[in-house]
Image (cartoon, helix red, strand yellow):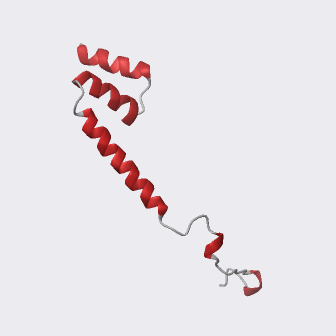
Amino acid sequence: MQLRTPRNLKTTEFKADIMQSEEDTHLNGVMSREANLQKMEDCLQTLSPDQKITVEMFYLQNKCYKEITEGHRNRME
């Protein structure tokens, strides 16, 4: 069984110069993000427990203000 016939098959030459980027810049973004997360972790260690939880919930867990206040309320009970 043949799915495609050669007459319907179209090929084109690969041209690296028309690509957005020939470099592996996507790895630079990953490394940059990892470095920023490490800096954030270092800074978090200097905060009080309540401040640390608030920053983690907002920036790392993407919680809204209401969810953060409810989370703090639940911890205090």
Q: Position of residue 72 (x, y in %)?
A: 30, 18
How many numbered marks does the figure carry? 0
Q: Residue furthest bottom?
A: 6
Choose between 4 and 32: the one closer to the eye.
32
The residue at 37%/22% (across/down) is 68
In the depicted structure, whether residue 13 falls above or below residue 70? below
Q: Quadrant of residue 63?
A: top left
- The C terminus lies in which quarter of the figure? top left
Q: Quadrant of residue 37?
A: top left
Q: Is residue 61 visible?
A: no
Q: Residue furthest right?
A: 7
Q: Position of residue 12 (x, y in %)?
A: 70, 80
> Relative to 70, is 11 on the left or the right?
right
The residue at 67%/84% (across/down) is 2
In the depicted structure, whether residue 68 falls above or below residue 12? above
The residue at 36%/17% (across/down) is 69
Choose between 2 and 12: the one closer to the eye.
12
Q: Is residue 23 visible?
A: yes
- The N terminus lies in which quarter of the figure? bottom right
Q: Position of residue 39 (x, y in %)?
A: 30, 42
Choose between 53 and 28: the one closer to the eye.
28
Q: Position of residue 6 (x, y in %)?
A: 73, 86
> Relative to 41, is 30 on the left or the right?
right
> Relative to 28, is 15 on the left or the right?
right
The residue at 24%/27% (across/down) is 47
In the depicted structure, whether residue 65 falls above or below residue 2? above
